[in-house]
Amino acid sequence: MKAYGIDVSEWQGDINWSQVQTDFAVIRAGYGRSALQRDKKFTANYEGCNANNIPCGAYWYSYAVTPEDALLEEEACLEVIKGGKYAYPIYYDVEQPEHFALGKAGVSEIIRTFLNKLESCGYWAGLYMSAYYLSNYVEDDIRNRYSIWVAHHDVDSPDYYGSYGMWQRSSTGLVGGIAGNVDLDICYVDYPSEIRKACLNGFAAETTKYVELTIDGSTYAGELTLLI
C-alpha cells in the first residue's frame, strides 16, 4: 500500500484542516525534556485531524545527550500525548549535531532508551532520521525493531539500505489549508490497521455484538463491531 501524507508543527501556523487533502498527518507533540515544551499548535492540530477524519501520528523532537535526558523526554512526550488516539506511530525525531557528536554507540543508546520506554507504555514506537545518519549512526537492533521514518528530500528514493515504513520526500510541498511549505511523506505500511489490531496508541480492543433492528416492519440482523 501507499498513503500520501504530511507532517506539521507550530511552524505551519494556523492550519485550516477542513481544507487539507491528505491521507494522514504526523504532528509534532513537542521537544526537549519538559511537557511545558509542548508544540504550540499540537492540540489544535490533533483536534483538527480528528474533526476532519484525518488519521494522525505524532513526533517528539530530541535534544537529549544522555540516556537520562532521553527518559525525561519520553516522560514529557507521554504527558503531552496522553488521552489521544493515534493511528500512526509515535516517532522520536533525532537530528541535532550534538547527537552525532556522541558517535554511533552513544546516539543509539539515547534512541534505544526513549523507544524502549515508549513501547513499554503501550505505544507503537518509531524513529525519524535522515538517510545518512540512519545508515551510519544507528545500531542494527534499533533499525530492525522499530518503525523507521527516513528523510531524504527531492530524490527518486531514499539513499538508505535498511527497511522503512515511511519516507519524508520533500520539505517544499504546497497543500490547501496550509500557508507556505509543508513536508510531504509516503507511507508503505497500513499502520492504522496494525495499531488498532494491536490495541496500541490509545486504541482498545474491538467489541462485537449481534444486533437486530426493525424498520417499517422489516428486521435487519448482523454483527456490529465497535472500536473503543
Image (cartoon, rainbow, N blue to C red):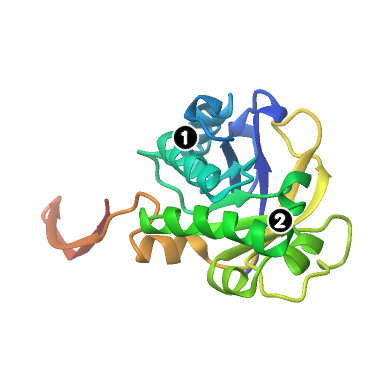
Asked whether disc 2 touches disc 1, contact meaning CB atoms under 8 Å apart, the reply is no
Determine the image quadrant of residue 189: bottom right
Mark number, residue 51: 1
| Amino acid type of the residue that numbered disc 2 sits on in the rendered structure | Met
Instruction: Using the image, determine if residue 82 lies above or below residue 44.
Output: below
Q: Nearer the viewer, residue 68 or 215?
A: 68
Q: Which mark is residue 129?
A: 2
Residue beneath the point at 40% across and 46% down? 85
Q: Amino acid at mark 1?
A: Ala
Q: How far is the residue under mark 2 from the one under mark 1? A: 30 Å
Q: Residues within 10 Å of mark 1 (few under 14, many from 20)?
A: few
Residue 56 pos. (x, y %): 53, 47
Q: 101 left or right of 199?
A: right
Image position of 203 with respect to 220: above or below = above
In this view, the residue in front, 31 or 108, is 108
**At which x and y percent is residue 51?**
47, 35
